[in-house]
Image: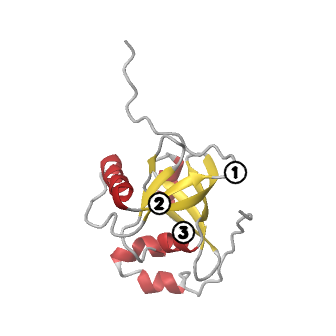
Amino acid sequence: MAALQVVQPVLPEDGRSRAGRRHSDRACMAGDAAAHEPDAIGDEMVAWGRAARIESRGWRSGLVRRAVVGFVASTDGSVLVAAGSASTAWALNLLADPSCVVTIGDRSFPAIAEPLDGAEHAAAVRDLVLRGGTPAEGLGHGPSFRLRPVGGAAGYGPVVSHPAEPE
């Protein structure tokens, strides 16, 4: 994967992109608009290891786009993620170009997004709901992916939330 270059858009006087203005009043699209703008809470969640930042190439613009999403770590070092709708921008980006960079905590790795279907999709959505208490009403109505590390990257190991008590 070629190195991703971050390009800062020139914004109008109000500081919001057209996408930000168009979606600002639509709560269901907040995740799409937020992918284009800094998000302090999302950055903290990524730093704490509670969320993953996905950097992908915009399917229309070709620019680097970032989204902060819930995830489930898999035992093989890959990360499972799911979109709330078929029109979620980060999911459309991964469908168009599966190359991405994943950041969780202080670790980043290049990955390839592999769409999940059937039982794998259902299991990923279930695990995301159980891990984060995510409301199930919308999650999984869009595509889900396995973000598999590439190029010898270590990926992200499984998270142990409650270590066993010493005997």
Marks 1,3: beta carbons within 8 A: no
Marks 2,3: beta carbons within 8 A: yes
Q: Residues within 10 Å of mark 3 (few under 14, many from 20)?
A: many
Q: Residues within 10 Å of mark 2 (few under 14, many from 20)?
A: many
Q: Amino acid at mark 3?
A: Leu
Q: CA distance from mark 1 to mark 2?
A: 19 Å
Q: Residue at x 48, y 74 (%)?
A: 89
* Quadrant (top left, top right, bottom left, bottom right) of the C terminus: top left
Q: Nearer the viewer, residue 166 or 74?
A: 74
Residue 64, position in %: x, y? 63, 71
Q: Nearer the viewer, residue 125 or 114?
A: 114
Q: CA distance from mark 1 to mark 3?
A: 18 Å
**Residue under numbered circle 2:** 145
What is the secondary structure assignment of the residue under circle 2? strand
Numbered label attached to residue 15: none
**Residue under numbered circle 1:** 151
**Residue under numbered circle 3:** 94
Question: How did the renderer colour the structure?
Answer: secondary structure
Q: Amino acid at mark 2?
A: Phe
